[in-house]
Amino acid sequence: EAGVAQSPRYKIIEKRQSVAFWCNPISGHATLYWYQQILGQGPKLLIQFQNNGVVDDSQLPKDRFSAERLKGVDSTLKIQPAKLEDSAVYLCASSLDWYSPLHFGNGTRLTVT
Amino acid sequence: AQTVTQSQPEMSVQEAETVTLSCTYDTSESNYYLFWYKQPPSRQMILVIRQEAYKQQNATENRFSVNFQKAAKSFSLKISDSQLGDTAMYFCAFMKQRGNAGNMLTFGGGTRLMVKP
């Protein structure tokens, strides 16, 4: 089966600019996650979708981050405006349902200058 | 809130030898899952092994095995016959289930493992 697809692979922007990341989960996976991984740390959950509904966004900085999952398939994570501390790898993951193992994509490395 | 602690930031091992990575966690839950993920330079998180808390038997997966001590809240990973391809970051993770609210996966800070030829 095809894995979780993410794009772009790398992105460099200046602070106060906006950026968007895209994720295509494994076909049929109902649950989709966005994680933020700051260099030298473990991933931290930003938001979790079940189909196209939000299950958990308690750690999403909602003043600048937003995410949507169109038609319960693809998802987009946006940052506007970006700050220096947003520099990180953004990982997307999906699972068949909420109690199944997670499958991760290769992530997007964001550098904010 | 759950916390996961990996006390070894970096470790190294000679090829073909055995290495053990440590992980401790803190939770008041009785039913949960524990995982070890591997993250090579490609950045993709790859599931290495999974342990259900209600199972007393330690999980094994080929050269990978765990030592799960529920009372001590300890979950170490043993890699036998280390190979160069095992070089990567290793993350311990805890998952509790929240019913219809889905699961929540909490990661430790990671251990960088280098396998030397």
Image (spheres, rainbow, N blue to C red):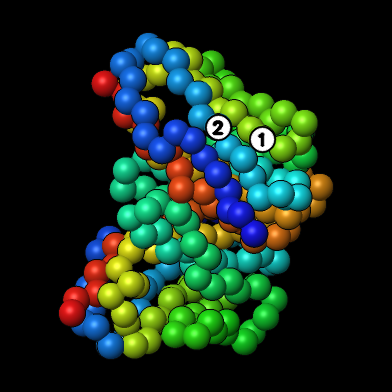
Q: Amino acid at mark 1?
A: Asp
Tell me the SS state at disc 2.
strand
The residue at 46%/81% (across/down) is B64
Q: Is residue B102 above or below residue A17?
A: below
How many numbered circles does the render carry?
2
Mark 2 surroundings within 10 Å by alpha-carbon count, few (fewer than 14), some (14 through 19), many (20 or more): some
User: For the residues marked 1 and 2, what is the alpha-carbon distance in whole angstroms?
Assistant: 7 Å
What is the chain identity of the residue bearing mark 2? A
Quadrant where the C terminus of chain A is found in the figure:
top left
> Do discs 1 and 2 belong to a common subunit?
yes
Residue B95 coordinates in the image, percent (x, y): 61, 58
From the image, tell me which residue sits under label 2. Answer: A22
> What is the three-letter code of the residue carrying label 2?
Trp
Quarter of image, res B81:
bottom left
Identify the residue at horizontal 38%, vertical 72% (top origin): B22
Q: Which residue is located at x 24 percent, y 69 percent?
A: B114
The crowding category of the residue bearing disc 1, from other C-alpha atoms within 10 Å (few below 14, some 14 to 19, many at least 20), is: some
- B89 vs B50, left or right, is left
Mark 1 lies on a secondary structure that is loop
Query: According to the image, label 1 marks what residue?
Result: A74
**Toward which corner of the image does residue B13 lie, by quadrant?**
bottom left
- Outermost residue, front direction? A2
| Depth order, front residue of A74/B33 | A74
